[in-house]
Amino acid sequence: MLHHLNFIVTDIDDIGRANVRMKPEGVPIVCGPGRPSQSESMFFYFLDPDGMTLEYRFGMEELPETGARPPRMFA
């Protein structure tokens, strides 16, 4: 089962612009804009016309296949 689609945006302002443009058009906002405590990325979840959850995200950490940083523990 597909939970949602994630689109990585290239500028943090893309998230704010999406929020400002979607609200007056009545696009259902699921969550956000926000920043999860586990990372420094920004997210924005909304529904497409078919009810599918879509996500815009900015600032995802990229980890290399080899030599990645040690895992972090979150409380």
Image: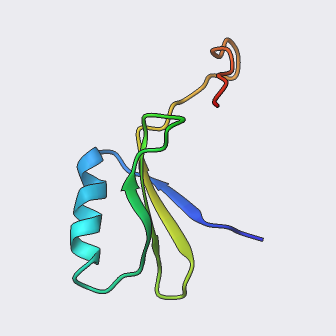
From what the image shows, is residue 61 above or below residue 43?
Answer: above
How many marks overall?
A: 0
User: 58 or 32: nearer the eye?
Assistant: 32
**Residue 34, x across and y down, in percent:** 39, 51
At 64% from the left edge and 22% from the top edge, which residue is drawn? Answer: 72
Q: Report the quarter where the C terminus lies.
A: top right
User: 45 or 74: nearer the eye?
Assistant: 74
Instruction: Please tell me in which quadrant of the rendered image residue 73 appears.
Output: top right
Instruction: Please tell me in which quadrant of the rendered image residue 25 appears.
Output: bottom left
Q: Report the quarter where the N terminus lies.
A: bottom right
Residue 51 is left or right of residue 3, and the answer is left
Residue 70 is left or right of residue 47, and the answer is right
Residue 75 is left or right of residue 62, and the answer is right
**Residue 18, x across and y down, in percent:** 28, 65
Coloring scheme of the render?
A: rainbow
**Residue 48, x across and y down, in percent:** 47, 80
Identity of the residue furthest to the top in this view: 67
At 54% from the left edge and 30% from the top edge, which residue is drawn? Answer: 62
At 43% from the left edge and 34% from the top edge, which residue is drawn? Answer: 40
User: 65 or 15: nearer the eye?
Assistant: 15
